[in-house]
Image: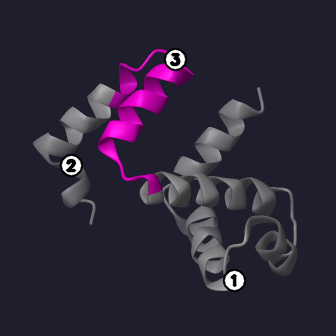
């Protein structure tokens, strides 16, 4: 999977994202780039990460977000054993 994340096309996408300058620019770019369902899924996962980071139990997260415990488990796996992207963003948002 790391190889797929390092393609020229992926680099171009990441560079485009880095050039976004406001929430409104993000909103319109991601709305054109992603389906509404994809955006909802990403938003849901990030809410799960924040709740997991605050040590909220899985069942309570499921009630608050409407997510399945399977989704919460997958997100927790990436939070604890992923590449550190979730932790990076959590740290930056808490500044």
Local packing at callout 1 (Cα closer than 10 Å; few below 14, some 14-19, many 20+) is some
Q: Mark 3 points at which residue?
A: 22
Question: Please, what secondary structure does the residue beneath circle 2 have?
Answer: helix
Could you tell me residue 54's position as x and y percent? 86, 57
Tell which of 31 and 56 is nearer to you: 31
Q: Distance between the residues labelled 3 and 2?
A: 26 Å
Q: How far apart are marks 1 and 2 (CA)?
A: 31 Å
Name which residue lies at 40% across and 38% down: 30
Could you tell me residue 9's position as x and y percent? 14, 42
Q: Which of marks 3 and 2 is nearer the N terminus?
A: 2
Local packing at callout 2 (Cα closer than 10 Å; few below 14, some 14-19, many 20+) is few
Q: Mark 1 points at which residue?
A: 69
Q: Is 47 covered by the magenta stretch? A: no
Could you tell me residue 49's position as x and y percent? 69, 58
Q: Residue 6 carries which label?
A: 2
Q: Name the mark nearer the viewer: 1 or 2.
A: 1
Name which residue lies at 67% across and 31% down: 92
Q: How far apart are marks 3 and 1 (CA)?
A: 33 Å
Residue at the farthest top position: 21
Span colored in magenta? 17-36
Question: Please, what secondary structure does the residue beneath circle 1 have?
Answer: helix
Q: Which of marks 1 and 2 is nearer the N terminus?
A: 2
Residue 57 appears left or right of 32: right
Could you tell me residue 11's position as x and y percent? 22, 38
* Relative to 82, residue 63 above or below: below
Which quadrant holds residue 56? Answer: bottom right
Name which residue lies at 64% across and 48% down: 87
Q: Are marks 1 and 2 in contact (CB under 8 Å)?
A: no
User: Main SS type for the magenta part?
Assistant: helix
* Relative to 87, residue 26 above or below: above
Local packing at callout 3 (Cα closer than 10 Å; few below 14, some 14-19, many 20+) is few
Residue at the farthest front position: 36
């Amino acid at each position: 999977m790391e190889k797929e994340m390092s393609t020229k096309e992926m680099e171009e996408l990441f560079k485009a994202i880095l050039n976004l300058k406001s929430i409104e620019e993000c909103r319109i770019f991601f709305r054109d780039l992603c389906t509404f369902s994809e955006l909802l899924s990403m938003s849901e996962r990030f809410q799960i990460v924040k709740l997991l980071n605050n040590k909220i139990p899985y069942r309570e997260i499921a009630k608050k977000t409407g997510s399945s415990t399977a989704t919460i488990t997958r997100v927790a796996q990436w939070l604890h054993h992923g590449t550190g992207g979730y932790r990076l963003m959590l740290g930056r948002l808490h500044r």
